[in-house]
Each structure stands twice: as structure tokens, then as C-alpha cells.
Amino acid sequence: MKIEIANGRLVDPAAGIDRVTSLYIAAAKVAAIGKPPEGWNASRIIDARGLVVAPGLIDVSARLREPGFEYKATLESEMQAAIAGGVTSLACPPDTDPPLDEPGLVEMLKHRARLLNQAHVYPIGALTVQLKGEELTEMGELAEAGCVAFSHADMPLVDTQVLLRAMQYASTFGYRVWLRPNDTHLGRGGVAHDGEVATRLGLPGIPSTAETVAIMTILALVRDTGVRVHLCRLSTADGVALVRAAKKEGLPVSCDVAIHHLHLCDVDIGWFDGNARLVPPLRTVRDRAALRAGVADGTIDLICSDHAPVDDDGKLVPFGEAEPGATGLELLLPLTLKWAAEEKVALPVALAKITCEPAKLLGVAAGDLRVGSSADICIFNPEQYWTVERNALKSQGKNTPFLGMELPGKVRCTLVGGHVVHEA
Amino acid sequence: MRNPQLTSNGELTHLLTLEGLPAPVITHILDTATPFVGIAEREVKKVPLLRGKAVFNLFFENSTRTRTTFEIAAKRLSADVINLNIGASSTTKGETLLDTVDNLVAMDADIFVVRHAQSGAPHLIAAHLNAHGRSHVHVVNAGDGRHSHPTQGLLDLYTIRHYKKEFHNLTVAIVGDVLHSRVARSLIHGLTTLGAPEVRVVGPKTLLPEKVESLGVRVFHDMREGVKGADVIVMLRLQNERMKGALLPSAGEYFKHYGLTPEKLALAKPDVIVMHPGPMNRGVEIDSAVADGDRAVILPQVTFGIAVRMAVMSIIAGN
Amino acid sequence: MPQASQIPDAESVLAALAERMRPAVAFDAAFVGIYSGGAWIADRLAKMIPGEHPVGYIDVSFYRDDFARSGLKSGAKRSELPFDVEGATIILVDDVLYTGRSVRAAVNELFDYGRPARIELAVLVDRGGRELPVEATYCGARLAVARSLSLVLAKDGEHLKFGVENAAEA
């Protein structure tokens, strides 16, 4: 199918393009930019005047809840949410039920996703069997089945010797290990950042040291093993400083931040709003400022949604009992735009954090719109505001601390492999 | 964000916490409690204010003492009282907290007195009632996790006012496990709102919450320094679990550093009053000589507690 | 009936009331004044009428019939009855008798203290407008007052005087 996307503002951070021009799609790829190819005859022309034409967004952490948690959300609903949010590729963590520790499960997930013909799904494999933190998984088999990296999701990996072995094994084959830095013991029993707000609200606290102690341990083991590590969901100012120093030292470390932590802090718990119960917890204003600075100077490589749909039963309970997580696939773009506007970050720089940088981390050929690239495209109106309401979200998870807020950035059209999969 | 405890004309409709309550609202409750103290001395200890109203005691955490005082208070207002002990877990019956509340509202509950192990549970219930247009149903927090025990805070304020008349020149020392104490948090909010100039917390670092000074208190780790010149000393109960949780080595060592003995008491002002929310651990927080001495006002606290709860329920039921 | 444009002199009405009560009141009757006006008058009557008359004060805030509509009013005081209500002869004292609802509340409250032998009612002014079957045993003066107005007793030192205000919204 030949599609012409006419006169939009093409922003391709990877290729360094930011100008009003037209894009020509044929045979599922970008065929030409600016001038149509020989003998061009479009089956469809999309009028993109006043809109931004960007590479489809890539979200490195989106829980699809299958297999095992279908009461919270299904592949169908969450894949719909992804393309409604302009996300054309996503990676899902291995904390399904059962966890993604066997090739069969990974294959089935990829197969189910392929059938839906929507976003590309890149599973992250479990680092240990059943995510129990005891035995290594067959990383070779899992990689062959399609896993692009290995992680421990949010499960504790307490035995440092197992962690060391997992890193050594992964580095033997060049696999990247994704770890959420959290010392199980220091954070034990906590539900909110250990500070003023938790003290006032009487909530058990998770100190910043739970993150920094874990980062220091991981970095020491990286030095030892040379494994490539990606630190997931930084939340502390001290954590950002540690990663900055590690990168300066030349360690093979990357990291990301969840979009919520660039916007909110512990005060946003308000009167015990369960939608603000997140992992890692929302921390202080000072931490938020350091996270923003970290994204600005490149210490933090990319932004993700950390999409975690939770049903009402999981959230309409006292704060300490609430299931952590927020729905985020449809908010990744608007919240990134809001952050960029507030910090005066240019659009291409901001979009890089959710397109080509994630693609680099995943090691996939995506996140750009050069001629010959897969036609995964997100067309959006950066000036159009919409209100975050339950019935505006396609995700089955309506759990977001941004409920009721007006955000900028409405996705008008999403293409995957040259096909229009979503239009608004 | 509007304070969920107040109606749009600033009147109290739920009592969830003392923080954020304007001083006049707190003072009004204390003033209203005074005539209720007199009711206890009559032949017929009842007034007809809440006749026909149903008060449901929803206790998700066991407490015979608190539940009994609420029951007595409600009955003295001529209300019907239903006690529901749901035990430690709200999901033992498979029903969520809010489903339980909805069922009870359908049974014409007017006031819920709620005690829960999780901070924020009464707020959740009040928000749910407000969201579903049930503004005639009121919530009184009888203690939620470590967060708040507003009626205890109020009766402590009443007791202090009874003996000291005013707050403007008071030094109050709160001693013990502030980290886990909803009583301490409520009293701190009440005292700072009513203008007590010096509120102190005294305890080892393991038992004081992070950034506790942000609540408006001065921190002392040395009890002798902490009670020096105090007008009021409030002793908090130490629970056994604290030894198991690696927060303290032993009750004995705790008593040595933080127990209230006659010798430490002598460092406070000569007319100091000693309070304790109860139940007391003699020989752990407080020496028997002090607990039974003439500075302790622990028993009057109980009488005032019933009157204060009567005042709270009368005020919110009428708004 | 005289009109409210002539605000009565409280002190002379009080003297008239005491005059009527003196020959009729029991030697040991207790005077129980309803706060605040009734309390002031009870104090004065106890000094003006010979006999042994214990004085008590009663606050009817918790017995009013408008709680459901208007909530709890602020300023509730402690009722003080320093005598045994059981078997007592009580003269309930109030400044203005109007709808009769305050008196009904006060009688209910007295019965929660015990069973009196008899209750009589003494008021400074009866302004008519009864909504309940209540009548004063002793009355200082009868006066018609417009529904839109309130007759209010004030104390200036030891001197009592009447004033007129706009009636509060229902």
C-alpha cells in the first residue's frame, strides 16, 4: 500500500531532520522524503498540515499482563492502548504469570502479539528461573526465542552471588542485564519515600539508600564482570549522581526514568491517593529536579512509561494495600511534551528520549524514519489538549495520578509497517 | 484540594485527622465537650441529640478500650450502636473495604467510627462517600495505622486545657516511640495549630520518624534535656514488637534512658502534668511511683475521652 | 395588647413578676433559669422573693428539636442543678415565652435529672405565638411582637434591659 503523509513537520531525531516536508511510504518502508519516488501513485494521502510526523514511539517498559493477569488487562486492550498512544514498539518485563523464563512462553507471547498486527513486542526474559533469584535461566534459548535482554522485573534478587553469576553468564554471550536498583532489606515494608510526607501521613518509608546501596553494589559487580547493565527507573538524586560518575569512569551502564517521576513527587500522594502508589516511590522535589537534570545532560538515556494497568479493586483500597503502578502507554507522549515545554527542551531532543534512544537500548532497527526504515510512524498534534478521563483511555487500567488533568499532545494517526493501525 | 473533612461552608462533616483543621474548629469541639462532661455526673447520663441515628463501629483492628468509649459516647447521645469487628484483614471475607461500607450505608448507617491498621483507610471511606453523594453519612477516625487518632489528640488537648487553661505559653514533651505513634502525630498537629510554642519529641533515633522536625517539633535524644522545664509530659506506649524489629535492644535499656522516673520528673516544672494514652507498661515507659503520683492525670483523660467523642459525633451529625 | 414599638422597661416588668410570685411561690421552690436571660432573672428573683430558693441554670442545646435542621449550635454551657431534682418543686425561669419549644426542651431535660414533684413556669414577657401547649404560671407582662422581630434581654452591670433585633433566619 502506498501512503503519502503530506506537509507535516517531520521530526526524526536520529537522522537530524526537523522540517516541514512530505513522507512517502511503500512496501512497509519509508520510500522517500521530500520528493515522491518515480511513478508515485498514492492509495492514500494523509494531510499532516499542522501536525508532527515522528518515528513511532518506543516504550521500553510496558506490562501487557498476559499471560496470567488477564483480569487486570489483556494483550488486546493494552496493544490498543499502545497504538492509541503512538507507541509502535514496546518491551515488556518478564513478570507475567508464569514469568517469561521459558522459550515456549516467549514464543507464544510474540506469536499472539504478531497476530494482532499492531505494535512490535520485544519481550525481556527472566534472569532467573521463576524470578526466584536462585537458578539461571536458559538465556541462549530465550534470546533465540526473541528476548532482547534479561531482567529481574521488580522481584528481589537478594543473593549477590547469584547476581554475580547471572552477570558473568550474560556477559559471556554479550547479553544486556536490566536491573531495578532496590535493596530489599532497606525498603522492606515501605510504601512511600521515607521523608516529610511519609512522616506526616504515617506511611512506612523506603529510604533513598534502598536505591543507592543497590546501585553501588551493581556498579561494583559491573566493574568486575564487564557486563552491560541497564538500570531501570531511577528515582533519587544520589542515584543520578552515581550513574553520572560511573559513565565518566567508562562503565557500560545505561539507565532510564519513568515519565511519572519527571513530573510528580511525594507531595502528590495528597490525601492517600492510591494512584500515586508507584514503584519506585515518588520522591522529593529535589530528586525530581535531579532526574530532570539527568535527562537533560544525557546521564539518563531515555524515558519510558513503566505502564502497569491495575484494576479498580487493586487501587480502591487503603494506600499501603494498593497495588503499585500507573497506566502509561497513552500518556508517554503527552507527558514527555509537557516536560519538554517546562524545561524548554527542543522537540527533537525530547522525542529522541522515546524513539531512537530506546531503539539503541533494545538493539533493534527502529526509532528513525530514514529511507529504507520500517514505516512505524506517529502523527500527532502537539498543540491539541485532551483531558485524561476513564473513558478516554483504551487501556483497561484507568489507574493514573493524572486523572482529570488536561495534557498536550493528541495522537492523530499511528502506522506500523506502513499500515494505519490507529486514527483519531 | 479541598479538605475532605469540611463541607463547602467550612463545617466539620468527617473527623479524619487534626492536621489542616482550622483552630476555631478544634476549639469549638473542645468547648462543646465541656457540657458533656457534666452529663456523666447525672442520674440519666443521656441526651436525645442522636436519637434515631445509627453509629456503626467498624473496627478492622481490635481495640476493646477505644471501641467501648465510642460505644458509651454514642449511647449517651441516644444513638443506636452496632459493633462490627472485622479483624485484622478486611479481605478475610473476600469483601473489599468499600463494598463493606456500601452494604452498611444501605442499612442506614449515619456515622462510621473506623479503626484500621492502614494509614489513610478512613480518608478512602470518606472520599468514597463524598464521591457517591452520601453527604449525610459521616466518618470518625478511631485510629488509622501510624497516621492519626484525632479523638485521642482532642481529648489530650482537652486535658491540657483543663489543667493549664491556655496553650500560648506551654512546653510539651512527647516521649517515646513517635515513629509508630498516631497519637503523637495527632497531638503534635493539635498543639501546633492551637499555638503551643514549644513542642518537643524525645526518643532514640530508631524511634523518631525521618524529617520529624518538619512537623514543627524540636528533637531531643537526651530525656533529661527533653523534659527540663516542661509543663506537660506525654508518655507513649512502647510495644514489644519494637524489640523484635531491631529498633531497640531491650525494655530494660529503654527504661533506663527514656522511662519517666521521679528523678527525671523533678527536672520539669513543679506543676507539670503527666499524661499517657494507655494502656501503660509500668516499668517500661513509666515508673509506678509517677503513674500513681499526684502529677499524673491519666484517669481523668478517660472521662474527658467520652465527652470529647460525644462532642465530635454531635457536631458532625448536625452538619 | 401594647405594641412592640414601646420596648418595655425590664426592671419594672421584673418587679411586677416578683410581685405576682411572692404570695404564690412555695417557700423551698428551686428557681432554674434557662441560659442566658432566664439565668440572670432566676438570680434576681432568688434575692427578691423570701424563702430558701436554690438557684440552678439549664442549657437546652442538647434537647432542642431543630438539631436535624440546624445542627449543634455553638456556645453550649454546662447545666448546673445544685439540688436534688427528685421530688423537688421547681420554678423554670425564662426571659421571653414565644413558641414554647425552649420550655418543652427544658422540661425534658429536667426529667433526665430525676422526677420533680411539680414544675411551674415564670417568664418576664409572654409575646404570644405559641406552637406548643405551654403556658406561664407567672408572667411579668404580655406583649405582641412582630414575627420578623426578636425581643432580647441584655445585662448592663446589674441592670437588665430589653432590646429588639431582626429575627434570625429560620
Image (cartoon, helix red, strand yellow):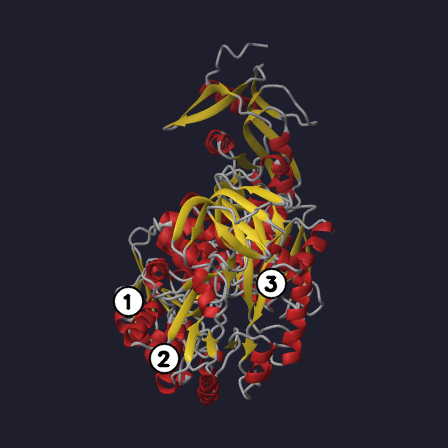
Q: Residue A219 bears which disc, if any?
A: 2
Q: Judge whether A205 appears above or below B309 on screen.
A: below
Q: Which residue is under mark 1?
A: B268
Q: Judge whether A2 appears above or below B63 on screen.
A: above
Question: C1 or B128, which is in the foreground?
Answer: B128
What is the x, y in percent for residue A61? 52, 66
What is the x, y in percent for residue B225? 25, 70
Give amino acid for label 1: Ala
> Is residue A128 at all visible to an observer of this figure?
yes
Please identify the quarter of the rendering in which residue B287 is found. bottom left
Q: Are marks 3 and 1 in contact (CB under 8 Å)?
A: no
Q: Chain of mark 2?
A: A
Q: Which residue is under mark 3?
A: B67
Question: Which residue appears at 58% of the width and 22% of the height?
Answer: C139
Q: Chain of mark 1?
A: B
Please identify the quarter of the rendering in which residue B268 is found. bottom left
Give amino acid for label 2: Leu
* Mark 3 burial class by Cα count in 10 Å: few <14, some 14-19, many 20+: many
Question: Which residue appears at 47% of the width and 78% of the height?
Answer: A177
Label 3 – label 2 distance at C-alpha: 53 Å
Label 3 – label 1 distance at C-alpha: 34 Å
Observer-side mark, 3 or 1, equals: 3
Co-location on one chain, circles 2 and 1: no
What is the x, y in percent for residue A320? 54, 65
